[in-house]
Image (cartoon, rainbow, N blue to C red):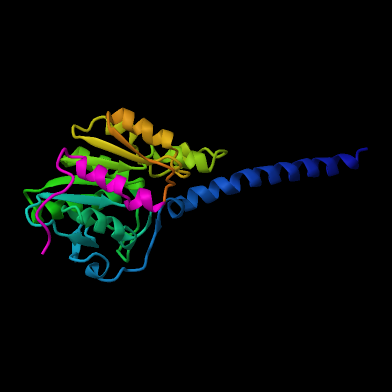
Amino acid sequence: MDRARPRVRRRVVLTAVTLVTVLLVPVAALWLLQRRIVFQPGTTRPGPAAAAVPGARDVVLHTADGLALDAWYLPAAAGCARTVLVAPGNAGSRADRAALARALGGRGPGVLLLDYRGYGGNPGAPDEPGLLRDATAAVEFLRAEVPGHRLTYFGESLGGAVVVALARRFSPAAVVLRSPFTELAAVAAAQFPRLPVRRMLWDTFPVHGAVGSLDVPVTVVHGERDSLVDPAQSLAVAAAAGARVVAVPGADHNDAALAHGPLVVDAVMRADGGAPECGTGRG
């Protein structure tokens, strides 16, 4: 019996170590790799703006911390004094938003497609403070380029959190949030339900708690079958903002109808109370 006890103790210790390892390894991996999970930039530098969006040109945005970020800018049609700043979601690059720029531009307003640091061949690595600096640089560019224009901030998913923070600093004519979440932790918790993600995240990207302080018209667009951001989260954001809600029937998070479909474009054009068409044509 005495000889058996050490073997039992070793088995108990080994079992305990195994359980701790099984629990801690996923937590450690999420802790160390979380920004690689959250931010999924397309790192390839897109080609010339005009090749993807006729009439657009390549521009450079200068951030407060010294980065030079490439972006695409489509000037507004003649007679249209409205411009849309597009803050993208967590993946891809401005090349993936070219169809949105073409669709919006076809209605007359100018469009600035922002690429964050680390995206689309830009220098730097993305994080929450950095993305706000990048969006600030975009607003500063537009204020210098088109000082009399009414600006609409369009935030796509993660970009919704960026433009809400931006709008609290630099008030636009309107804000449009496409597939907004209440906070980043709510999305992470849905993906990793057994991990204490709220205590682990370096970047929080709050939307629900901040959007109610905006003193501008807010529109929330969501897909009825969004499998990444629960539509209930988008509706909670809309309720907090007192926002107009536009539901895209049957649309998932990355479907074309939700990325650049007519319901989305129309929502942007009507967000500031203006006409659904603007200007007298391009060229």
Whether 249 is among the magenta residues is: no
Identify the residue at horizontal 24%, vertical 30% (top origin).
213
Relative to 160, say whether 99 is above or below: below
Relative to 73, say whether 156 is above or below: above
Q: Position of residue 35 (x, y in %)?
A: 43, 52
Quarter of the picture containing the C terminus is: bottom left
**Is residue 7 toward the left or the right of residue 97 in the image?**
right
Q: Position of residue 278 (x, y in %)?
A: 13, 49
Identify the residue at horizontal 20%, vertical 56% (top origin).
105
Q: Position of residue 168 (x, y in %)?
A: 21, 37
**219 or 166, which is in the foreground?**
219
**Magenta-tinted stretch:** 255-283
Q: Is residue 161 visible?
A: no
Relative to 33, say whether 196 is above or below: above
**Is residue 23 toward the left or the right of residue 63 in the image?**
right
Q: Position of residue 231 (x, y in %)?
A: 42, 37
Residue 181 image-quadrant placement: top left
**Is residue 22 toward the left or the right of residue 140 in the image?**
right
